[in-house]
Image (cartoon, helix red, strand yellow):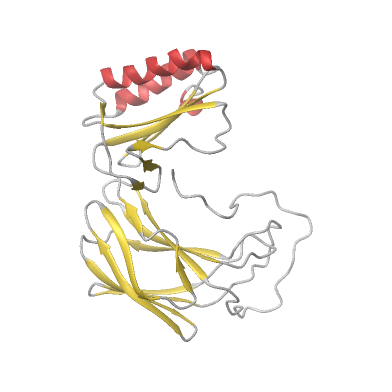
Amino acid sequence: MKRVILYILLIIFSPSCEKKETNNYQIFESDLIVSMDEVLNTPSRIFNLFIITEKIYPCCNYKIPTKLAVKDKKIFLEPLGVDIQDICLTALGPAATTITIGNIEEAVYDIEFLIGTNKSYGKLLCSDSEFQLQMDKLVQLKINGSILMRIPDNLIWGRVGYHSDTSISLVDDFLNSLKDLGAVEISLDNGNYNYFEIENSKIKEPNNSGYYFTKSFVFSFAGDKNPIRSLVKEFSINHGDQMSIRVYGDKGEEYLGWVLRNE
């Protein structure tokens, strides 16, 4: 499953908003936690680093301004402090930022983090199958997942949610229809693929999905994905009250049944 985000980005504004008195950044009062992220896109993918504070703040929209430099297979990051926003989204959360590194090559990069006077450094290994952070020194910095598996080309995955166990036959009909279109079962290595996790050679079911039952799937699929979109729409129009379908693709495709049925 896509990694659990520790704070809420969208929340109702509270009428009790706090105003910032200074533009100076607050010093970090805790360790920073770094995780990796790869956004699927066409024609290229985007590699990001997600940084949050271990400390939880009273407003979930505090930011971490960060300097970034990427040159000659070297990545340098300097988080500058906690930026207290003028408007407070009054829900607990860490200060956070997403650093866009970009479409990086399959190579080995030196990587360095500077937090005040604390320097952490190591290697970022990028291959066609995974990203790996191998840190030689960590000071005021923690790594949340040192390996991120990459989504293989020609992959589709998703989940069907349903509230009654009697709907399983419809779920199986949908999955068999995907196979009729050319979807082929595939075995992936165990690990975190950002959008889902593979454990014991199987895709993990989500926690707290909002449905009594879920059935997740991952397939290899080469060729035009428009027939998949049409299939999701057809099943959602005819059976949307009994099942909820979502299908994703390696180029960033997103087919959500509840959206397609209302087009």
Identify whether 137 is placed above or below 228.
Answer: below
Is 181 or 186 nearer to us in this picture?
A: 186
The quarter of the image holding the N terminus is top left
Q: Residue at x 50, y 64 (%)?
A: 97
Picture residue at 37% right of the left edge, 61% below the top: 146
| Above/below status of 94 relative to 261 | below
Outermost residue toward the right?
Answer: 16
Q: Position of residue 189 (x, y in %)?
A: 28, 44
Residue 246 shows in this picture: no
Is residue 211 found left or right of 36 in the rendered image? right
- The percent position of residue 258, horizontal first and vertical second, equals 51, 26
Q: Position of residue 55 (x, y in %)?
A: 61, 68
**Residue 89, above or below 256:** below
Residue at x-position 21% and y-position 30%: 223
Residue at the limit of the structure toward the bottom, as seen here: 117
Q: Residue 119 sits in which quadrant?
A: bottom left
Determine the image quadrant of residue 133: bottom left
The answer to whether any part of residue 66 appears in the image is yes
Q: What's the residue at 28%, 40% (across, down)? A: 188
Q: Position of residue 127 (x, y in %)?
A: 22, 57
